[in-house]
Every structure is written in C-alpha cells, then in structure tokens.
C-alpha cells in the first residue's frame, strides 16, 4: 500500500522557518562551492544538424560527460506538451496527487513521491517528483502519467555517435544495453523544486551521477542545474530549446572510462519554482555491467570489474548506498 507523501511543495507553502534536516553542512552549500567569475570553460553546446555533431558529442562526453543539444529534431510543441502535463500534475490538489503515491513496500520507484522520505541521518533535499516507465510498451503502468515524450530517437542517435567514437559499430552500444528497441527501458521523471526561504542552505538534489546509461533532460528557464569539473561546480546556463544530455554510469563503465558519468546537483530559488523533465535510458535488468569486450585486452586492462553483476543488482546497490 502506498504511503502518505510528505510533500516539500506543501511544506514550502506554509513554511515559517527552514527545518534543520534540510540544512546542508557548510562545505556542501551552493554559495560556498559554486565557481563564480570569468572562466574559459563552457559546457558544450552541440548543434545536432551539423556534420561535426558526432565529433562534438564524443569530445563533450570525454571532457565533461554532459552537453546541450540544439537543433535536435524534437518539435517544440512536443516539449511544451510534456511541460504542460507536468505542471498540471503538480497543480492538482494534494489529495489527488496522493492517489499516485509511490509504494515503498513494492520495491518499485514509480509514482508520486518526495525526497523528504529519506533514511534517518540523511540530509533531506528540496524537491518532489513523479516517476514512471514510458518504454517499452509492455512495461508501462498506465496508472501513472501516460504521456510519452518524443525523445527516443534522439537518445538512440547519441548512443550511435558515442559507439562510433569508441571505434565500435554505431549500433554496438544500444545492442549491448538492450539488444533492440524492446530491451532499452525509458523512465520519465518530473522534478518539482518549490521556492525556498533560504536557498543558500539547501540543495534541490544532492551531488550524484546517474546510474543509467544516458539521461535526456528538458528544463524550464529557472537556473539550478550544476555540474562538477576538476573539483569545481559550474552552472548550466539555460539555452532555449536545448535538450541536456548527461552521460550515465553505464556508458562510463562500458567505455572503460573513455566517457565520464557527470557528477551533478541542483540548487533552488528563493522566489521561483523550478521544474525539470528527465528521461533516463536504462539497460535491460539482466544486462551484465562491465566494459565492452572489444575495449579491453591486448594490454588494455579493464578499469571496472563488477564480477558479473547485473544492472538490476547495480541499481539496488547504488540506491541503497551499498558497496558495488
């Protein structure tokens, strides 16, 4: 049975003083750790319509683990519809949203939930979310938000370009992760970050890498996403119409470290609500985590050895903060 969601959205609407369980230690606070000032470093923007897009993607995945894709082919009206439905969900009365609450006892992550619900000792993060599977069709639970964003083709194109950048056939990465269209799993999430009275003390999401293969992210125009490079945190500037592409753990591991899974976090605003709409591209559950066989051997050692661990087991360990 689903539990009662302890909503940050509800908390923020009636908050007088910031609860201490949200306050980050000094060394984690955004103001103290975000790079400010002139910098020659810019998060790459890749024009997907240009002939050099593949080379630019490979360079970005190697150096940053993230890039912003423009002229990507996803219609603006499809993105607007995705955003509209997400906003409408979080505008529903709390009792209505509660009908879609996650059921922790089921072991599944689908449904409406809140980052307030954490284990004792964890610092809480300033966000609510809605999470559900959107592909393959057989895995979709239509009890949750059923709209499917048109980003599948773009995710496959990125996988193809990154495969080629490793010297593999274009379809090698997608084939390894899913063995075809029905093998890859797409999870849609909607993140809701309400205004916070003291945003300099909290995080909308703590520093992490994505456990999946790839994340395709739609954002609104409220800043908040930050990525880490060389020990510094950089703001991801809003580029109208862009999709943000994050390299996840599985691509870093499969590439034997050639590509990097980007460490990122989210800050929040004092005046504005921020929302984002990520699609996580997951391998099939029984995918065996490790470098591609053609990228190791012949004097090249494997940098990762998970001893035949499946993606399902990898996911369980990462979510529950267990050793891999």
Image (tube, rainbow, N blue to C red):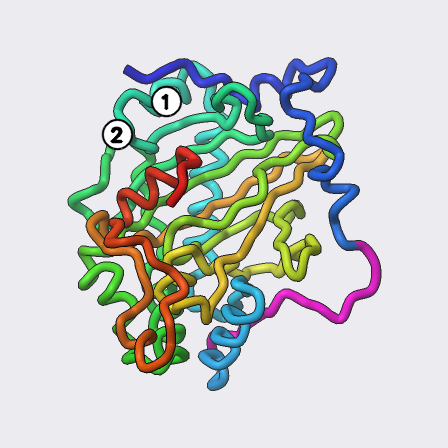
Residue located 57% across and 18% down the image: 10
Q: Is residue 235 left or right of residue 304?
A: right
Front residue of 122/322: it is 322
Q: Is 245 within the magenta?
A: no
**Which is in the foreground here, disc 1 or disc 2?**
1
Q: Which mark is residue 143?
A: 2
Q: What label sits on residue 40 in the rendered view?
A: none
Structural distance between the alpha carbons of marks 1 and 2: 11 Å
Total numbered circles: 2
Question: Callout 2 environment at 10 Å: few (<14), some (14 to 19), or many (20+)?
Answer: few
In the rendered view, would you say 33 is above or below 45? above
Q: Residue furthest right?
A: 37
* Quarter of the figure that contains the N terminus: top left
Instruction: Tell me where the magenta segment starts and ends, as one range.
Output: 36-49
- Residue 298 position, x and y percent, is 32, 82
Compare residues 21 and 196 and report the one nearer the observer: 21
Kindly state the secondary structure of the residue where label 1 is placed.
Answer: loop
User: Which secondary structure type mostly characterizes the magenta part of the structure?
Assistant: loop
Rendered residue at 48%/22% (across/down): 119
Horizontal and vertical percent position of residue 176 = 24, 65
Q: Is residue 134 above or below residue 42?
A: above
110 up-or-down from 20: above or below: below
Q: Residue at x 27, y 54 (%)?
A: 307
In the image, taking residue 104 as reference, residue 138 lies left or right, namely left
Report which residue position mark 1 lands on.
101
| Label 2: which secondary element | loop
| Image position, residue 56 (x, y; %) | 52, 78
């Amino acid at each position: 049975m689903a539990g009662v969601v302890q909503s940050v959205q509800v908390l923020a609407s009636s908050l007088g003083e910031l609860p201490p369980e949200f306050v980050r230690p000094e060394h984690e606070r955004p103001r103290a750790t975000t790079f400010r000032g002139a910098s020659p470093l810019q998060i790459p923007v890749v024009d997907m319509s240009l002939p050099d897009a593949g080379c630019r993607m490979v360079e970005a995945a190697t150096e940053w683990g993230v890039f912003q894709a423009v002229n990507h082919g996803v219609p603006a009206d499809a993105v607007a519809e995705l955003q509209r439905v997400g906003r409408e969900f979080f505008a529903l009365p709390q009792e209505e949203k509660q009908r879609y609450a996650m059921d922790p006892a089921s072991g599944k992550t689908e449904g409406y939930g809140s980052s307030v619900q954490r284990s004792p000792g964890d610092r809480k993060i300033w966000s609510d979310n809605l999470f559900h599977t959107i592909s393959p069709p057989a895995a979709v639970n239509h009890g949750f938000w059923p709209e499917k964003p048109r980003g599948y083709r773009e995710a496959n194109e990125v996988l193809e370009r990154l495969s080629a950048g490793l010297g593999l056939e274009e379809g090698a990465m997608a084939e390894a992760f899913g063995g075809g269209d029905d093998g890859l799993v797409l999870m849609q999430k909607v993140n809701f970050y309400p205004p916070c009275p003291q945003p300099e003390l909290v995080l909308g999401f703590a520093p992490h890498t994505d456990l999946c293969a790839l994340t395709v992210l739609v954002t609104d125009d409220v800043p908040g996403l930050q990525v880490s490079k060389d020990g510094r945190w950089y703001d991801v500037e809003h580029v109208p119409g862009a999709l943000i592409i994050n390299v996840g753990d599985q691509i870093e591991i499969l590439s034997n470290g050639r590509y990097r899974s980007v460490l990122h976090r989210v800050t929040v605003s004092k005046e504005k609500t921020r929302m984002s709409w990520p699609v996580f591209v997951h391998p099939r559950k029984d995918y065996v985590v490790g470098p591609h066989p053609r990228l190791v051997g012949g004097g090249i050692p494997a940098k990762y050895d998970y001893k035949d661990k499946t993606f399902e087991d990898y996911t369980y360990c990462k979510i529950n903060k267990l050793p891999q």
